[in-house]
Image (cartoon, helix red, strand yellow):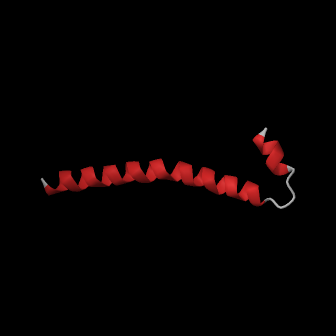
Amino acid sequence: MCRAVLENEDGMKAAKGINNGIVYLMAIPYILVGGVIFLVYKKMKNK
């Protein structure tokens, strides 16, 4: 339903904002997991 409303909008500003928000929300967990893996790797390498 949200998609239909966003596609019918003339300016498409809201659609771009929603897409950017989705990308932001998807990227944060990957960045956090990557950071944890990097820290564990650094600790294991030092031992």
* Left/right of residue 23 with respect to residue 10 in the rendered view: left
Residue appearing at x 85%, y 54% in the figure: 9
Image spot of residue 42 (x, y percent): 23, 56
Residue appearing at x 56%, y 54% in the figure: 24
Instruction: Name the quadrant containing residue 2.
Output: top right
**Residue at the far left in the pictured view:** 47
Residue appearing at x 80%, y 49% in the figure: 6
* Left/right of residue 33 with respect to residue 40 in the rendered view: right
**Residue at the far top in the pictured view:** 1
The front one of 11 and 37 is 11
The front one of 47 and 29 is 29
The front one of 27 and 15 is 15
Image spot of residue 1 (x, y percent): 79, 38
Image spot of residue 45 (x, y percent): 19, 55
Instruction: Name the quadrant containing residue 46.
Output: bottom left
Q: For the image shown, how many numbered marks are present on the structure?
A: 0
Residue appearing at x 87%, y 58% in the figure: 10
Image spot of residue 7 (x, y percent): 83, 50
